[in-house]
Image (cartoon, rainbow, N blue to C red):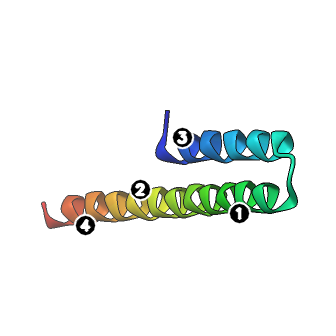
Amino acid sequence: MTPSEHFMQHAAECKFMASLARDPESKKTWMGMAERWHRCAELAKEQSAYQAKQARHRKQVKSWSH
């Protein structure tokens, strides 16, 4: 499981907990946590894509040096 998938799982769990919460403040807290986990997932995807791009670039540069 990728970090992004792991974070999305946490977001889903928080949304589920929000659905079970009885008072509005608890719902708000759980939904806020879900939003933060979702943002972590987005950032992890961006970082993974950036690292993959950097690895491809390094590979291209290395092939040019030979």
Q: From mark 3 to mark 1, how far is it between C-alphas?
A: 17 Å
Q: Does dot 3 land on a helix, a strand or a loop? A: helix
Number of other residues with Cα within 10 Å of mark 4, as a class: few under 14, some 14 to 19, many 20 or more: few
Q: Which residue is mark 2?
A: 52
The amino acid sitting under disc 2 is: Ala
63, above or below 7, in the image: below
Which image quadrant for residue 23?
A: bottom right
Q: Does dot 4 land on a helix, a strand or a loop? A: helix
Kindly identify the residue that appears in the image at 49 percent across and 40 percent down: 2
The image's mark for residue 41 is: none
Q: Is residue 41 left or right of residue 49?
A: right
Q: From mark 3 to mark 2, how far is it between C-alphas?
A: 19 Å
Q: Position of residue 10 (x, y in %)?
A: 61, 43
Q: Position of residue 44 (x, y in %)?
A: 50, 57
The answer to whether mark 3 and mark 4 are in CB contact below 8 A is no
The image's mark for residue 61 is: 4
The amino acid sitting under disc 3 is: His
Q: Does dot 2 land on a helix, a strand or a loop? A: helix
Q: Which residue is mark 3?
A: 6
The amino acid sitting under disc 1 is: Gly
The answer to whether mark 3 and mark 2 are in CB contact below 8 A is no
Q: Nearer the viewer, mark 4 or mark 1?
A: 1
Depth check: 30 or 43 in front? 30
